[in-house]
Image (cartoon, coloured by chain):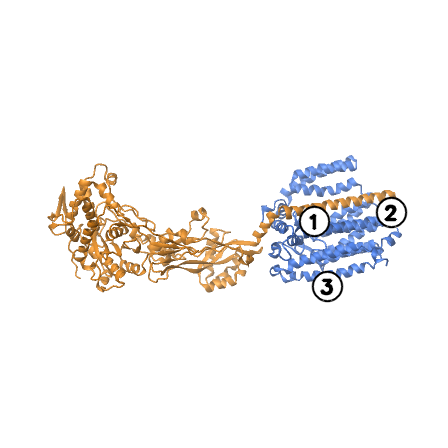
Chain colours: A orange, B blue
Amino acid sequence: MQYRKKNRSQISIRVLQVGIIILGLIMLGRLVQLQIIQHDRYGPLSRENSLRQEIVNPARGLIYDRHGNLLVDNEPIYTITITPASYKEKNTPLLADLLNMSVEDVKKRVKETQAYSWYRSSRLFTEVDFRTFSIIQENIWRLPGIGHQVESKREYPVDSLNASHILGYLREVSKEEYLGTKNYHLGDKTGKSGLEMVYEDQLRGELGTKYIKINAMGQNLGPYRNGAIDEAPNKGADLLTTIDTQLQLLAEDLLQDKVGAAVALDPNSGEVLALASAPSYDIRKLSGRIDSTYWVNINADTTNPLYNRAISSSQPPGSTFKPLMALMGLNMGIINPDTKIENPGYYQRGRRYNDLADPGTYDVGKALQESSNTFFFWLMDKIATTKGINRWHDLASSLGLGQRNGIDLPNETRGTLPDSSYLDRVLGEGKWGIGDQLSLGVGQGFLGASPLQMALVASQIGNGGYRVQPHLVSAISKSNGKELRTAPQKKEIKWLSKQSLNTVKKGMRRVVTNGGASTFANLDSIKVAGKTGTAQNPHGQDHGWFISFAPMDDPKIAVAVLVENGGYGSVSAAPIASLMIEQYLTGELNRPYVYNYVKTFEPRKQTTDEEPEEIETDD
Amino acid sequence: MTNLRELSWSLIVIWVSLIAVGLVAIYSATQGPVAEFLPEYIQINFYKQLIAFGIAILLLIGLQFLNPRTFQEGSYFFYGIGIVLMILTLLFGKEVNGAKSWLAIGPFNLQTSELMKIATVLAVANYLTSRRNISAENIKSALTTVLLILVPTVLVILQNDTGTAIIFASLIPVILFWSGLPYGISLFIISPAVISYLTIISWYWGLIAAVILTLLIFMLQRRTWLTFASFVTGIIIVIGIQVSLSQVLQPHQRARIEAFTNPSFDPQGAGWNVIQAKTAIGSGGLYGKGFMEGTQTQLRFLPEQWTDFIFCVIGEEFGFIGASFVILLLLALSIRLLKAASAHKHPFAQLVIIGVTTIYFMHFFINVGSATALLPVIGVPLPFISYGGSALITNTIMLGICLNLDFYKRQFSIYR
């Protein structure tokens, strides 16, 4: 018995020892599994646990004018965010108190964010003032679910400068945009018009990342390893534009309360000196928190302030097309500078085409000066019958009509420059004849051009027949110090002879000295050349045009102005262009009466659909 | 007193090492950068543990001056006092973390179930060795033994302390086995635990375990009724657990089981502790992140990191080296105690040491098992390491008794 008992206890000890050792080995094995085999999995897991990756938005690139003046800047705005799932509703009175708002307003807004997403952080209030922001920051620990961030909005340092159609505005990215690319996150803003849109990729910069230590309660415990592995955002590239701020300000001022557009180019380079479209919208109201009533209003406005007439509107150029007609006639050999025709006061071809110019003998110079329709009907007749409309189309298109010219703004129009297939399409094959083509010779009918295109025509006549590329940005200055220069080459337009150009320039000079533009466009100090025009408008008052360049022999500026429903170009558009030229070339305005005239201009009722010869104004 | 060299110094070295490791871990878990997230009454835990250590040293020394017979003679008395205290706790106790196991006596908060562990071990050992003819082979004495253990177990369950109840219950098979219960029946008694555990992981594992255990029981003890009972019990457990998992259990209980089998099912809720504990230990790697450098610990991702999840702190900050050192220390403690039991001639001393070893080891296994997700999360402290004055003092008293019995083994056995 005793022996058996002893034996039994020895066995029992062995059993217990073996049991303990087996369980001990299981535990050690588990440690090997977790700490050595699966360490690669749990190591990163613990880092993710204790770290939060935050996106750091880069500062958006700035925009400068041609003299280095800052046009578009960034301004910090302070935003309070909320994650509804972690927010406690009982804190609403405290939050409202800190924000200095009514409890109802806060409640309402909280509800909206809950409806949007329960788990995603969204903006509760944006553009709160810095003091409120600081108060929230101090009390953030009492307000679970509430966060804060500093964002930025666009700011425009030149006081009265709008340039809304050049600069453009930003809006929050759409769902497609933030899901489609990894560059955007919900709530980011992207350029939706103007330079902000075209140069979005350069202006945006690259997102940075910041690593923040957090605890299990999600509280921020400061930077991880003092920011050693943070990636700083790359600031967006700055744009150096060709805008002349003084000229732009003047153009906007002169177009105020009118409907129309003005484009000023450097004729030798295609640089856009000024580009204004009226009516325009207040660019400051679309920066930062969008004033939604304002947004609804400008979208509903029938004059369409968001529409950039300078490059998007296509109107018949009227008589401003005549210099180009003259060039075509001269270079095709149909006329020479001395070719004379008799003008009985109309042109007869199937029917009678009226001419407001005095009857008499006309050569091309006089025809330009007096804007004789008869001369150009006749010329168009010759071109259409001997060379064909397609030849006419090709020559006109080489100056930039009927096509996009690649300006760095969105929604540029092609305009309309008919050729035979166009007429076939619109009127039906074989159903069009000389009558449909004659009106093209005086810039009417199917012809349509934007103010930008007409400014190009003026530039290319003025610069001696070189094709230029219109552009607004001359250089992109990257955050790493590199600068990309845009250097569009000017290209000789082969069919234009110097001789014919001189003839036409002289004719355009005569328009200003003796013709329709002499009242408002003739400057003592500068030799301005130009051409007035009136676009027929079946829907109401005709549109006034004026194209010009100056100084005539070595032009530094070319301007095209369109005043919708302005009536004659000589009284509506010419004074605006002339003031812009004066401002740009002399740096000052010496004709207060012209300025006042433009500012108080009211288009008069006018009934004829042809260009007038004589301008009756009481100067 | 006899020669001091007779004292088991190796046990004392292990004891001091474990407490030292515990103090380091508690310091890191409550005094490091994490302190800013902790209420003040937890920040002072380290100092309270230091004081408890001081008291424990005095108790350990003091116990060596007692006559070993005292433990045997006083055992029923202690048991009675313990039961009374437990009932008082149930009536007037303080609830901490959902368990009503604390009794305020003057300025001290006493976890009465801790003291009850000693009393139960002593009483059971005394009962089983009081007369010659008593042994677990005798059905009546076996049932009495079970009853002696079940009373405190039920009281602990009423106090809502599942972890401690499991510790108490685990005494039953070990004590009975040691006292001569046939091997087959002993295996039969623990088989439900093994089958349940495996069934929770997967029902077919449970089924395989039931079959294998039945075969083993048949090989150990060729009794048809036992084999049959074992097989039927196994099947009932597998089915019962499947049914209760889907039907009977309360949602929060089920969540805990699911958190164990599939923690990623609800990572922010029931699975949180499991995921964070595994992440802490796993991210420690071979050498650990360094003292007070563990992000899981210092950023407060671990719950109860000074008590139930203290092993995670060690695993994260001292890596595999530190964690396996702790496991080896606790294994050495258990093996060394078993050696002392086998070397002892007196059955009372043997049973007491075996009982104490069982309590230590079960704490150790459940705690480490929970922290490493080998077991569902069951909140029990890691002996000598976790914060907790009552536990440290109780554990030390138990060790002191074992040391005393071992120290006086020659004199004590003479009476036999």
Please, what secondary structure does the residue beneath circle 3 have? loop
* Residue A491 in sight: yes
Please, what secondary structure does the residue beneath circle 2 have? loop
Q: Where on the picture, by quarter, is residue B258?
A: top right
Front: mark 1 or 3: 1
* Residue B268 in sight: no
Front: mark 1 or 2: 1
Q: Which residue is mark 3?
A: B106
Q: Choose between B266 and B361: the one closer to the eye.
A: B361
Left or right of A443? Residue A71 is right
Residues packed near mark 1 inside 10 Å, few (<14), some (14 to 19) or many (20 plus): many
Q: Residue under mark 3: which chain is it in?
A: B
Q: What is the CA distance from the residue labelled 1 to the residue labelled 2?
A: 35 Å
The residue at 23%/64% (across/down) is A590
Name which residue type carries label 3.
Gly
Q: Which residue is mark 1?
A: B366
Q: Which residue is mark 2?
A: B132
Image disc number at residue A147: none
